[in-house]
Amino acid sequence: MSNNSSEIARLRAALAASEARAEAAESELAQTRAVVSTSEAMIKHLRLEIAKLRREQYGRSSERRARLIDQMELQLEELEAAATEDEIAAEKMTKTTTVAGFERRRPARKPFPDHLPRERVVIAAPTACSCCGSDRIVKMGEDVTETLEVIPRRWKVIQTVREKFSCRSCEKISQPPAPFHATPRGWAGPNLLATILFEKFGQHQPLNRQAERYAREGVDLSLSTLADQVGACAAALEPIHALIGAHVLGADRLHGDDTTVPLLAKGGTKTARLWTYVRDDRPFGGGAPPAALFQFSRDRGMTNPNRHLAGWQGILQADAYGGYNDLYREDREPGAVGSALCWSHARRKFFELADIKGNARKGKPAHDISPVALEAVTRIDVVFDIERGINGLTAAERHAIRQRLSRPLVEALHDWLCAERDRMSKHNPVAKAINYMFTKDRWTAFTRFLDDGRVCLTNNAAERALRGVALGRKSWLFVGSERGGDRAAFMYSLIVTAKMNDVDPQAWLADVLARLPGTTASRVPDLLPWNWTRAEQRIAA
């Protein structure tokens, strides 16, 4: 009997030792997973930071860089979440085993902004020594741990009271005048109106989603009520929009581009267009503030740019879309518009044929990579490098440097492309990419930048202005009507112009809506984004 008891005890001890070893192994495995997850997250984080730094330093030199950064950020979200889960699992295993704990290395977090208010919460201090129990303790310092917190949006109703007084001598009633309201039906304050406008057109949140969120916060505002205020704000902001439009069309050089917008129609949607015309003189050190003017149309016909730029004359930087051709006619009134074509569009056609990584992802063999296209991209990139170095110089300085450095490269590129094309079939994709630059005397438009220091090498300014529209399409899906498209173009003109001038669009809209009703026509230019100052700055001044 005693032998059986001792055998059972031995087996239990062996089982316990085996379970301990299994737990230790499982704990080590959990920590290994945590280490791997953390390493992957750190590597992705560092790659993302490097990509962002390169983007800030060199600009959008790669056609796919912006999209790749977006993908990297999404991947980083998943890796960080997985690393945290693995870290917590490792910590739980450490508590039940003797294996050393795992401490995750995280990227350095920026300190909380100084402008945020601080709420000091003091934990009750001990009244006696935790060791001996003596009450003879004195304060020798403190440790402060900061935790970032957010308070849900706070709604309030402002009651504006106008007291009435009766005169005992003449019995006439005296009362202060009613205050100005941002819109005719002045139930919404300017900050609420700016929030509605910016979330719809700047953050791509349709009014129905806004109404649902407001209802969850205890404020029931119907879709029709919000839409009514959007229309009222558009009417109120018309003087600002008119000044921005006049400023844009007063430029001697414009960037132009367009993008698709789904327009609700019978039985589904049709493809409409949002056009943008951007004035940006900063590349050649011009003093005029940047601004963007948007237009909406039901189609992409050439009548649209003719209507948008009627009476305007200057240099238009755009792609090779044939709809602009009427603007370039010599018999146009008041005169022909000069064409300056975009080298990014030309480079993209070669880049797609020389994208080794892209072809590898598609499973294409290495010999499908065109050496001619790769050489063309390399040559064009040298010209891009020169342009980055002269960005911000005066037009005269840019012209002189281009004549000395860029012109020989461009002329050599022209001769090399012609020689290569002569050896190819006309059906060769590379030949088609070359013909894009030479067809219909486009080479003159492509090389206009060499003779005018104001002209940019690319049309990226217009493409940047349209980026918000491309992002918004995924949220609002379509434009409800032609009037809705015009209203969207109207609001994009205001918001994009504010961003181009490093102005917070929502704060600017709130202040403009509050001040505009009481502003005389001669003072309206003070409210333009490049002239605008915040209320606290005006008070300090």
Image (tube, helix red, strand yellow):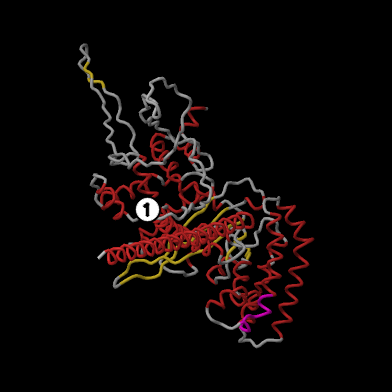
Image x and y of residue 130, in percent: 39, 29
Instruction: Give the amino acid at mark 1.
Output: Lys
Please identify the residue farthest to the top as the structure is shown. 169
Q: Residues within 10 Å of mark 1 (few under 14, many from 20)?
A: many
Which residue is at the front of the view, 304 or 47? 47
Drawn side of residue 30 relative to residue 232, left or right? right
Main secondary structure along the magenta-highlighted residues = helix
Q: How many marks?
A: 1
Image x and y of residue 203, in percent: 41, 53
Any part of residue 177 in sight: yes
Image x and y of residue 189, in percent: 33, 39
Does 413 sit above or below residue 33? below
Residue ID at (68%, 86%):
424
Residue ID at (65%, 72%):
442
Give the quadrant of residue 90: bottom left
Residue ID at (36%, 40%):
190
Please identify the residue farthest to the front as the structure is shown. 2
Which quadrant is the N terminus positioned in? bottom left
Q: Label 1, on which residue?
A: 200
Residue ID at (59%, 83%):
365
Q: Does the magenta segment cover residue 373?
A: yes
Image x and y of residue 165, in percent: 23, 19
Magenta span of residues: 366-374
Please identify the residue farthest to the bottom as the structure is shown. 425
Which residue is at the front of the view, 422 or 177? 422
Drawn side of residue 297 relative to residue 345, left or right? left
Q: Secondary structure at mark 1?
A: helix
Any part of residue 487 in sight: no
Which residue is at the front of the view, 80 or 394? 80
